[in-house]
Amino acid sequence: MIASTIDGVTDVSKTISCFNSAGWRQRREGMIRAILFDSDGVLVDTERMFFEATQAAFSALGVCLSRNQWAKWYMGEGRRSREIAALFGLSLASVERVIQNRNEMFWRRVASGVPILPGVRDILPCLSSRFRLAIVTGASRPHFDRVHAHTGLPWYFELVVTSDDYEEPKPSPQAYLTALNKLSLKPFECLAVEDSPRGAAAATSAGIRCVLVPTLLTEIALCPGDCEILAELKNLSNLIPEGV
């Protein structure tokens, strides 16, 4: 799904002219002081791990959950796993068994090692010397701490905002508004990096310029139209001119 979609979208790391010119001029009036990263699917490959564990748990009950369905229902529309199971007509008892088996499988895989996504280890040292860095995740603090127990990535970030810090989940802007408040920054002083429609909508609703780094689970058609598409995270610094 995503490969063909990416082929049809201009990579803004190569063609700056694809920016909305009026919005770009307005943003250039202020200096970018902070970059706000989502965690799962942007820094670490846990979105894929979570989907694959869910897919396997569904398959054990004879249900085929496709990547496209997960990208639309979970990543795009924010449906919970129980809602998705109900769409397949699973009984309540079966749903609870699916969720339990999925969670156990996912955390076993996390314990075996969490893959860092391409470009992350290369770009964070460079960015941390130029900008304030923060993480704005929809995950709970226990989830975040467990995922990052051995990644070494939190060291680069001065702030981590988790779902424990706000009430309304993405696509509500609350997560990003919380980060702005804690950092004492204005929306135009920040850049958000997301991988999902819900995350991108949360950032743009907070007035923050958003860069989308798609994965195989990203349904680009559901993302806000003013997102900037970046094929590779390693090219993120190309979007921020020197001196800004």
Image (cartoon, rainbow, N blue to C red):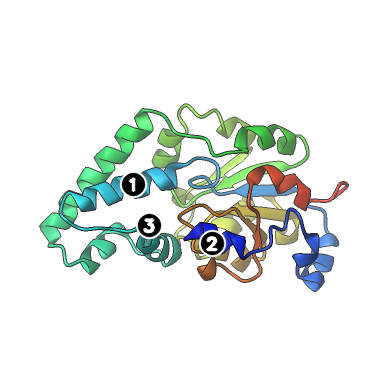
Q: Nearer the viewer, residue 69 or 79?
A: 69
Q: What amino acid type is highlighted by mark number 1? A: Glu
Residue drawn 34% across the image and 34% down it:
109
Mark 1 or 2, which is nearer the eye?
A: 2
Residue drawn 17% across the image and 53% down it:
96
Residue drawn 75% across the image and 42% down it:
131
Q: What amino acid type is highlighted by mark number 3? A: Arg
Residue drawn 28% across the image and 63% down it:
84
The residue that label 1 is drawn on is 52
Q: Could you tell me residue 100's position as x and y percent?
A: 21, 46
Per the image, label 3 sits on a secondary structure element best described as helix
Q: Quadrant of residue 176?
A: bottom right
Per the image, label 2 sits on a secondary structure element best described as helix
Q: Nearer the viewer, residue 113 or 96?
A: 113
Q: Could you tell me residue 111's position as x and y percent?
A: 35, 29
Q: Which mark is residue 67?
A: 3
How far is mark 1 from mark 2, CA to CA?
21 Å
Q: Could you tell me residue 170's position as x and y percent?
A: 48, 61
Q: Quadrant of residue 30?
A: bottom right
Q: What amino acid type is highlighted by mark number 2? A: Ser
Q: Residues within 10 Å of mark 2 (few under 14, many from 20)?
A: few
Asked if residue 173 shows in the view, the reply is no
Mark 1 or mark 3, earlier in chain: 1
Left or right: 137 as drawn, with respect to 11 = left
The residue that label 2 is drawn on is 4
Q: Are marks 1 and 2 in contact (CB under 8 Å)?
A: no
Vertically, is 33 above or below 170? above
